[in-house]
Amino acid sequence: MPRISEYTYFARSYELTKRKQITLIPIKKKAMDNIFPIVVPNKWVSGVGSSVVCLFSKTSNDIVCPHFWELKAWTGCPFSCSYCYLQGTFRGAERKKPRMKDKDKIARFLREFLCWADSVGLKTLLNAGEVADSLAVPDYVRRFLKIALPILDRHPDHKILFLTKGGTKHIKVLEEIPSDMRDRFVISFSINPRAVAKRYEHGAADSLDRIEAARMVAEMGFEVRIRIDPIIPVEGWILHYTKLVDDLLDKIEPSRITIGSLRALKKTIKFSRDNSWLEYIRMFPEKTSWGLRIRRELRVRMFAIIIEALKSRGYNKHIALCKEPYEVWLELHRMGLLDHPGKTAIWENVMCNCKL
């Protein structure tokens, strides 16, 4: 394997602090091309350097997924979602069990990363839900907050994203975050209709309980985002997903909504205990560089119906797709349902769950 010497993070103008912006060079000199390349040292590259904080840049150029920052202070998930990619990531259910890393290592790498980001004038959102359910083990969150809050207080340009399928009992730990620090956290809930959750999301909170938790978290002063992912075309799916939109928007208006579909990666298929979810892919599979998918025509239809349902309810904030091929984005853009994602591999117009 060739040695990776460096990666580039394409920062958007709002991700830069004014005091450092003059030291960065835009890709083009036009005002509209306000993307700034920042060289990322090996230490902060996934698979090369730090095992706690790193740049996620794994997707190929044909998959719309802007690079983002991972926080891996703890890993794994106690829930047993049939389709979960963590089964493949950790090569089996046993290794998927939650584990927290050494507190001194967490503190050191978090502090060093934020110092580096400050030195290049970069504001960051650290995603603590890429290799874990962020709130499924509240004791881990509690221990992490004791480490992170003093560090975050000294680095005011950075935030942390918690992503969860947890519910009202899992969010109580967030009350321990001081009210004047709650704007430093984004809480995102992954939600499917009850018919889908009951069949495929074993151990996770009931869908309506997740929505209630999202409402409560918003009242506590946190920014709330929603993922409807993965959409699964169970019998009656149109009714189930349009009702989910109604149930959701009756309680809360998320700052952004990201939608995704089933992604059958090779390792996920190999290590999944329950492969019943693959029935939706095997009949007419589409092979992509990020796994097998439900046939494209049906995916586009599912995305379109959900986006139209959101817009019909007056939702006018950011909507994005998760790790979908460029052609799918383009088709929905032509339909007037999504913004154009932007330049290949940069995707500067995509305001999805993992971006600041």
Image (cartoon, grey):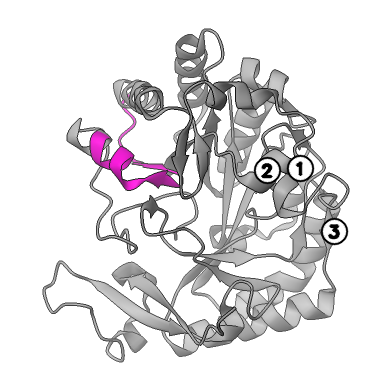
Q: Is residue 328 magenta?
A: yes
Q: Quadrant of residue 219?
A: top right
Between residues 217 and 240, which one lies in front from this camera angle? 240
Confirm or deny contact between disc 3 and disc 2 (CB under 8 A).
no
**Which of pointers 3 and 2 indicates the residue nearer the eye?**
2
Kindly report the distance in space between the C-alpha atoms of the residues bearing marks 3 and 2. 20 Å
* Residue shown at 81% from the left, 47% from the top: 92
Confirm or deny contact between disc 1 and disc 2 (CB under 8 A).
yes
Q: Between disc 3 and disc 2, whose residue precedes?
A: 3
Q: Which mark is residue 123?
A: none
Q: Is residue 107 magenta?
A: no
Q: Is residue 123 above or below residue 2?
A: above
Residue marked by disc 1: 271
Residue marked by disc 2: 268
Q: Secondary structure at mark 3?
A: strand
State the image coordinates of residue 106 (x, y, percent, origin top left): 75, 75
Which amino acid, mark 3?
Answer: Arg
Residue marked by disc 3: 99
* Residue shown at 56% from the left, 85% from the top: 3
Q: Along the horizontal axis of the image, is 130 left or right of 331?
A: right
Write down the region rendered in magenta: 314-331
* Residue shown at 71% from the left, 28% from the top: 275
Is residue 171 visible in the rendered image? The answer is no
Q: Along the horizontal axis of the image, is 47 left or right of 346?
A: right
Which amino acid, mark 2?
Answer: Thr
State the image coordinates of residue 65 (x, y, percent, origin top left): 42, 55
Q: Secondary structure at mark 1?
A: helix
Q: Quadrant of residue 257?
A: top left
Which amino acid, mark 1?
Answer: Phe
Kindly report the distance in space between the C-alpha atoms of the residues bearing marks 1 and 3. 19 Å
Q: Secondary structure at mark 2?
A: helix
Confirm or deny contact between disc 1 and disc 3 (CB under 8 A).
no
